[in-house]
């Protein structure tokens, strides 16, 4: 019927006992000191808490789920008022017959049952207990629910991240196998070299990065270099340079994060381009940010605009999931060069 009703067992039974035990102890000491009569305080609090506790749980587990969470506030108010009247009758009667004929010693004058001031005082006292207990209970429920939602969201992000990473792998190998097929049709002697390098790439993907969130940047650079060597076998005239301007030995990055950017440089730069030039720059900025930049020349023609592949789309989704808004990905054209610059926070090895 409601979240509260569904989650009522989330709070351990021992915590209920702790709450009521401490609440009882504080009231016992408070009124015992006030009257200088701890015997009377013990008896009156035992009586009152025997009524407080059922009323609190009746309110939390029945009235709130049935009326408040269904927006039936008028019915809730009426039901609560009737409950308070029942508690008043029980408390007044039991106090009179069991504890003392003075049903309200706190008032410093004698009151008779059903006097307005006495009714109001008892009802306010019960509402006070309801407010304290309900606030504590609902706060704990809210904290538990927030933690549960956080865990669900984190789990969903992990699943989506794994899905996106798994998409990148088939996408890349599909392209490489196409290249290998084209070479085999030509009976090229480059085929064995392609197969060896492809096996190294597959070993990295299937074993080296399996189940890891971050990998050493140097491993990713080696992976990119193997990929470049395969692409060099496919392109007749291509120049690729990798410049690393900083110490990257202890830097870690999400696996397969940069490969889509390198793929795009070959894919779009190689169209109608007899002299493809690619430059990769990697450096650390201010000790906190890793900059990964790729520049490739291209030949402007009617074929320049191509359908956007899933590689770059997935890279953007992964960046959003991993780094939230703490990254920048810029793409621009300058002097017939296509420039892609990615900057992400540095993840150092612990």
Image (tube, grey):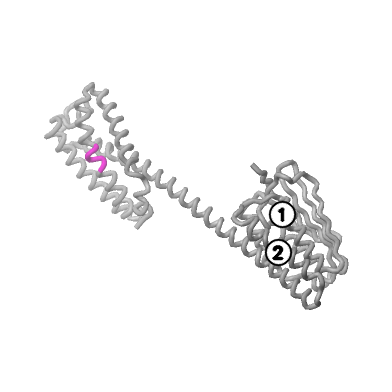
**Over which residues does the magenta segment extend?**
49-53
- Identify the residue under disc 2: 199
Q: Residue at x 14, y 30 (%)?
A: 100
Q: Position of residue 141 (x, y in %)?
A: 40, 47
Q: Which residue sits at x=17%, y=41%?
A: 90
Residue 235: % across, % down = 83, 68
Tell me, yes or no, whether the highlighted magenta stretch contains residue 124.
no
Position of the C terminus, as image quadrant, is top right
Q: Main secondary structure of the magenta part?
A: helix
Q: What element does badge 2 sit on?
A: helix
> Which one is closest to the eye, mark 1 or mark 2?
2
Label 2: few (<14), some (14–19) or many (≥20) C-alpha neighbours in 10 Å: few
Which residue is most to the left? 97
- Quick check: 102 above or below 251? above
Q: Quadrant of the N terminus?
A: bottom left
Mark 1 secondary-structure assignment: helix
Residue 52 highlighted magenta (yes or no): yes
Q: Are marks 1 and 2 in contact (CB under 8 Å)?
A: no
Which residue is the extreme one toward the top? 36
Q: Gap between marks 1 and 2, in whole Å?
A: 16 Å
Taking the image as shown, residue 70 lies to the left or right of residue 288, namely: left
- Left or right for 170, reference 299: left
In this rendering, the count of numbered labels is: 2
Where residue 95 appears, as percent x and y from the top left, is 16, 34
Badge 1 local density, few (<14 within 10 Å), some, or many (20+)? many
Q: Earlier along the polypeptide chain: callout 1 or callout 2?
A: 2
Give left or right: position of 98 versus 153: left
Left or right of 198, for residue 190 = right
Q: Residue at x 53, y 53 (%)?
A: 154
The residue located at (78%, 78%) in the rendering is: 185
What residue is disc 1 on? 220
Closer to the camera, 170 or 147? 170
């Amino acid at each position: 019927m409601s979240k509260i009703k569904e989650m009522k067992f989330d709070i351990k039974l021992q915590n209920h006992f702790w709450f009521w035990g401490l609440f009882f102890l504080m009231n016992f000491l408070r009124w015992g000191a006030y009257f200088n009569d701890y015997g009377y305080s013990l008896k009156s609090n035992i009586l009152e808490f025997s009524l407080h506790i059922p009323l609190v749980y009746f309110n939390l587990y029945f009235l709130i789920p049935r009326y408040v969470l269904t927006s039936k506030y008028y019915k809730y108010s009426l039901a609560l008022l009737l409950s308070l009247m029942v508690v008043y009758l029980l408390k007044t009667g039991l106090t009179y017959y069991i504890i003392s004929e003075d049903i309200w010693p706190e008032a410093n004058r004698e009151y008779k049952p059903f006097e307005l001031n006495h009714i109001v005082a008892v009802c306010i006292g019960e509402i006070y207990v309801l407010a304290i207990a309900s606030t504590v209970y609902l706060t704990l429920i809210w904290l538990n629910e927030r933690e549960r939602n956080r865990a669900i969201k984190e789990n969903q992000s992990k699943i989506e991240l794994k899905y996106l990473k798994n998409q990148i792998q088939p996408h890349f190998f599909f392209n490489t196998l196409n290249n290998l097929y084209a070479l085999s049709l030509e009976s090229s002697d480059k085929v064995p070299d392609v197969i060896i390098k492809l096996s190294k790439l597959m070993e990295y993907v299937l074993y080296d990065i399996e189940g890891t969130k971050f990998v050493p940047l140097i491993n990713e650079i080696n992976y990119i270099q193997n990929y470049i060597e395969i692409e060099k076998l496919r392109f007749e005239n291509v120049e690729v340079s990798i410049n690393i301007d900083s110490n990257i030995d202890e830097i870690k990055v999400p696996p397969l994060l940069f490969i889509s950017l390198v793929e795009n440089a070959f894919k779009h730069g190689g169209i109608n381009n007899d002299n493809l030039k690619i430059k990769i720059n990697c450096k650390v900025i201010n000790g906190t940010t890793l900059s990964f930049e790729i520049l490739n020349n291209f030949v402007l023609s009617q074929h320049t605009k191509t359908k956007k592949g899933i590689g770059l789309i997935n890279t953007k989704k992964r960046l959003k999931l991993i780094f939230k808004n703490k990254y920048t990905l810029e793409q621009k054209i300058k002097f017939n060069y296509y420039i892609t610059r990615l900057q992400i926070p540095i993840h150092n090895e612990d």
